Image: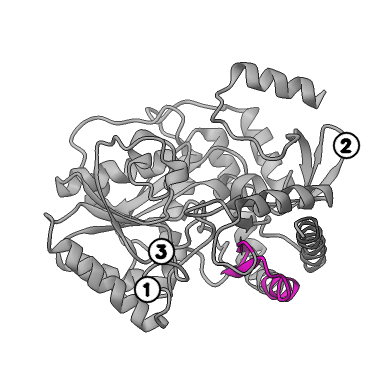
Amino acid sequence: MTKDLLGRHRDVLPDWLALYYQDPLEITHGEGRHVWDAEGNKYLDFFGGILTTMTAHALPEVTKAVSEQAGRIIHSSTLYLNRPMVELAERVAQLSGIPDARVFFTTSGTEANDTALMLATSYRKSNQILAMRNSYHGRSFSSVGITGNRGWSPTSLSPLQTLYVHGGVRTRGPYADLNDAEFIAACVEDLKDLLGHVRPPAALIAEPVQGVGGFTSPPDGLYAAFREVLAERGVLWIADEVQTGWGRTGDHFWGWQAHAENGPPDILTFAKGIGNGMSIGGVVARADIMNCLDSNSISTFGGTQITMAAGLANLTYLLEHDLQGNARRVGGLLIERLRAVVAQHPGVREVRGRGLMIGIELVKPGTDQADPDAASAVLEAAREGGLLIGKGGGHNTSALRIAPPLSLTVAEAEEGAAILERALRSTQQSTR
């Protein structure tokens, strides 16, 4: 059945629509932190539909809210008052940390970043954007134009002029050997030098932790130091929280809060986890920025009642059950367990991350060279062992990405780490 579905997939869908695994997987249902495939195999899910199943699969509170809302009305568009949309916007605005915040809902993180770019360039009357090397912000024409990761940038054409800044990757690049304070100082000087050669840009867009880039991040405080330089020139700061938001990093509710010394971002984008699988994205911005557009704009599907009902139920569950605290506690244990697992593995360069957003970077043993073949092999071996994980990376896709639902238990963390240990060991032995 799966092979038949794969053939039909290839007949009607684009060649560039990537599938994991040599024998791709059809996931048919899930519960908690587990999913099942069409053959009945059970897997511990450490990737959550690319960080989207944030609380749990088939969370009763969310499924009940969706079912009840579907029985009333599913959709009406933003041309009509929408109580669930207003209620979720009120909660998101309050949680964002942005003063006098306004919220606009979209259907994805890509669309949210598109909107943020339109707001920033309109507000500043500039099409120049600063972005981070190794970044990823979506697959639309404008968001691809600011993506600093060659593997996810299919065209150099763009409506924007993008200038790339150092700092998103702590352990690679020209400043990798510096200590944290020196690293930040060097990146700030690079930013100042860059700004001295161009007209003032509209904004800097940055992921506090780079997602597709392999869960890399700068030292805490880098974006606060950038913010000080940018604010002097009126340049806006857009925090792309599509993967880092809602407490996933454990230490903070938003990734930007690790860089908060000079205040919140001017614009914040979010998506993925808030809908727990329902299609929700959005933008939060100060009122003067959000209201700068001088023509009509609506969203047909952004903020539709059924997705807002899911978001409200999911956010309520997240806060009432302190899943941010769980991400901090269980994520901290999982990171230490994984570091112990790979201590004697010559093909692992680094275990990094915070909370339940963890990257394991693989290299060819004895070198600093990325090893995408090893990453693919571990992905396959982990699946055989009953664990689903992701992968990503900068110059090459050689980082394993681990991002389970935030309700992960200690026992499940131990189980996943043990499966990964066996997968790493088996792939290491097969390459000897």
| Mark before the other along the chain sequence, 1 or 3 | 3
Marks 2,3: beta carbons within 8 A: no
> Foreground mark, 2 or 1?
1
| Mark before the other along the chain sequence, 2 or 3 | 2
> Foreground mark, 2 or 3?
3
Q: Along the line of sight, which residue is nearer the eye, 288 or 111?
A: 111
| Mark before the other along the chain sequence, 2 or 1 | 2
Magenta stretch in the rendered image: 335-364
Q: Residue at x 63, y 29 (%)?
A: 70
Look at the image and say whether residue 327 sits in the magenta stretch: no
Instruction: Say what amino acid the circle numbered 2 marks.
Output: Gly
| Separation of marks 1 and 3 at Cα, in angstroms | 11 Å
Q: Going by the picture, which residue comes out furthest to the front?
A: 432
Which scheme is used to colour this image of the protein? Answer: one colour
Q: Along the line of sight, which residue is nearer the eye, 104 or 110?
A: 110
Residue 328 place in picture, x, y as percent: 63, 71
Disc sitting over residue 40 in the figure: 2
Query: Is residue 44 in sight in this rendering?
Result: no
Residue 332 place in picture, x, y as percent: 66, 74
Instruction: Say what amino acid the circle numbered 3 marks.
Output: Gly
Residue 234 quadrant: bottom left
Q: Residue at x 48, y 51 (%)?
A: 242
Q: Is residue 326 left or right of residue 272?
A: right
Q: Secondary structure at mark 2?
A: loop
Q: Residue at x 26, y 44 (%)?
A: 119
Q: Is residue 116 left or right of residue 170?
A: left
